[in-house]
């Protein structure tokens, strides 16, 4: 039965894989019921807003009958239990025994904190795959809970999730869905063991993250190698630190302050590592997550291709969780901003930084490849920024204004523009002559520039009246107006 402390904890934790808030009873209620029945079950709190604010509802026999009618109208009927607590109604939905369940609006399944509608193909694959045990929900009755529960790891999680200890630790773990009562004893499931224990071996030895730095572009000479076998969140952070240690930095000056910028945006790397941890196939015990750094690329690989129900065409736009409980925990700890947005955030971060687009390979393994910026370009940028920093310091010491420094930088940029190498212009001209419909991405790759650098040169050439782009951005073509020589 619900009590004040448990309700307070649930409000802090917010909606999740097994918790849904609804301000009132409406036509969307059957959707949430079938989603829980098709997943692992859960509770629907009626009278609480999405923002975890208690509004309350006026309970009546009519309202209770309406809720029961909604459950009975599903096909098959969804088993529910209705509980009253103060001015709230709590609907307990058990995992269904006759999946899949549907309501008038269709078939739904729980994904993170959301109920996601299934397509015909999703439903077919769901039926085919039903009965396969979810790895993260397997109860570890072979592991003594007290021997593997790590309080300091648990405390860090509570801080990340902004959860205060209004109840004892066991109650919080049960609400998070990772601690299970079985035969009058407490046991972790695999998700609990992965997230709240520091000792993965020998039970989950395959959940390690292996990071490696290679000399050159092949797996021949290993310069540095680390195997991280802590809890999942520590493994994520350690993998990010490994990448930051071995990737290049450049510097930007803002208000006379030096800002370090990684050659590949950290947000893109972080999303890729989190994605690998969240979506790997943990039933595959013969391979670890690999984070590999080469001279020309960074490669992050996890066992297991795309989850069932996610086609290559839908990749990046639809979220299908292989490990929904692990995903829910990472989302609570703010490692996942919103389910289904990770790939979009990777692409957006790279585009904003002017980096090449990532390459995805979805076979038996899932791999994301980030192309690295050539070392010479990084060194040139770093040298320029260091010089700007010293100039800024001198300006500050001598009392010169930021405006004067800006003028100097502008003149320097103008000189660099006027003296840009002719070979770049000639390469672009030749590429257009050979294929007027060549894309900007193809040109950037062939010329050896970032997409942002290529756009700079194209804009310069268009302004000079050398070339023009005719038609739409994607379907148009390039036309050479006049090959003007640099003076």
Image (spheres, rainbow, N blue to C red):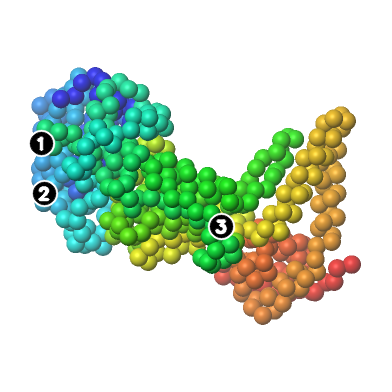
Give the residue pinned by disc 1. 183
Foreground tag (2 vs 1):
1
* Label 1 environment density (alpha carbons within 10 Å; few <14, some 14–19, many ≥20): few
- Percent position of residue 272, x then y: 46, 52
Q: Nearer the viewer, residue 244 or 420?
A: 244
- Percent position of residue 481, x then y: 76, 73
Seen in the image, is 16 located left or right of residue 476?
left
* Label 3 environment density (alpha carbons within 10 Å; few <14, some 14–19, many ≥20): few
Q: Quadrant of residue 160?
A: top left
Q: Which mark is residue 97?
A: 2
Seen in the image, is 40 located left or right of residue 159?
left
Q: Residue at x 57, y 66 (%)?
A: 217
Q: Which of marks 3 and 1 precedes in the sequence?
A: 1
Q: Are marks 2 and 1 in contact (CB under 8 Å)?
A: no
- Percent position of residue 253, x then y: 72, 40
In terms of secondary structure, where does tag 2 sit?
A: loop
Q: Residue at x 67, y 80 (%)?
A: 434
Give the residue pinned by disc 3. 223
Position of the C terminus, as image quadrant, is bottom right
Q: CA distance from mark 1 to mark 3?
A: 50 Å
Q: Nearer the viewer, residue 430 or 295?
A: 295
Q: Quadrant of residue 59?
A: top left
Q: Is residue 9 visible?
A: yes
Foreground tag (2 vs 3):
3
Q: Residue at x 33, y 38 (%)?
A: 197
In terms of secondary structure, where does tag 1 sit?
A: loop
């Amino acid at each position: 039965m619900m009590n004040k402390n448990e309700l307070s904890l649930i409000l802090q934790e917010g909606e999740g894989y097994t918790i849904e808030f609804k301000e009132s009873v409406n036509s969307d209620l059957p959707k949430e019921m079938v989603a829980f029945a098709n997943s692992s079950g859960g509770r629907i709190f009626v009278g609480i807003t999405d923002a975890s604010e208690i509004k309350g509802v006026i309970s009546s026999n009519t309202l209770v009958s309406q809720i029961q009618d909604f459950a009975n109208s599903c096909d098959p009927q969804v088993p529910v239990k209705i509980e009253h607590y103060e001015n709230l109604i709590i609907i307990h939905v058990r995992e269904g025994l006759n999946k899949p369940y549907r309501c008038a609006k269709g078939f739904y399944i729980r994904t993170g904190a959301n109920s996601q509608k299934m397509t015909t193909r999703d439903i077919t694959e769901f039926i085919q795959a039903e009965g396969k045990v979810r790895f993260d929900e397997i109860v570890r009755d072979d592991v003594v809970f007290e021997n593997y529960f790590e309080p300091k790891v648990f405390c860090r999680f509570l801080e990340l999730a902004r959860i205060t200890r209004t109840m004892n630790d066991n109650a919080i773990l049960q609400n998070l869905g990772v601690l299970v009562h079985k035969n009058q004893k407490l046991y972790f499931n695999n998700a609990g063991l992965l997230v709240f224990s520091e000792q993965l071996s020998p039970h989950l030895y395959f959940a390690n993250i292996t990071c490696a730095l290679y000399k050159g572009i092949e797996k021949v000479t290993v310069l540095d190698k680390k195997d991280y076998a802590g809890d999942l969140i520590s493994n994520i952070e350690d993998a990010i630190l490994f990448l930051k240690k071995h990737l290049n930095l450049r510097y930007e000056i803002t208000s006379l302050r030096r800002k370090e910028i990684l050659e590949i945006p950290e947000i893109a790397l972080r999303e890729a590592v989190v994605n690998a941890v969240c979506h790997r196939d943990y039933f595959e015990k013969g391979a670890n997550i690999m984070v590999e750094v080469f001279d020309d690329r960074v490669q992050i690989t996890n066992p297991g291709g795309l989850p069932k129900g996610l086609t290559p065409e839908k990749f990046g736009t639809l979220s299908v969780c292989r490990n929904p409980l692990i995903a829910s925990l990472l989302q609570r700890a703010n490692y996942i901003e919103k389910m289904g947005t990770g790939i979009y955030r990777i692409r957006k971060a790279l585009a904003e930084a002017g980096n090449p687009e990532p390459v995805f390979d979805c076979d038996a393994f899932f791999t994301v490849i980030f192309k690295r910026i050539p070392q010479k370009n990084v060194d040139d940028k770093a040298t320029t920024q260091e010089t700007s920093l010293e100039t800024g310091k001198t300006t500050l010491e001598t009392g010169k204004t930021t405006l004067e420094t800006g003028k100097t930088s502008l003149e320097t940029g103008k000189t660099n523009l006027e003296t840009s190498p002719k070979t770049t212009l000639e390469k672009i001209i030749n590429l257009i002559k050979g294929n007027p419909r060549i894309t900007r991405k193809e040109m950037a790759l062939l010329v050896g520039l970032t997409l942002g650098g290529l756009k700079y040169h194209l804009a310069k050439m268009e302004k000079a009246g050398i070339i023009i782009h005719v038609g739409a951005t994607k379907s148009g073509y390039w036309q050479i107006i006049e090959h003007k020589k640099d003076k």
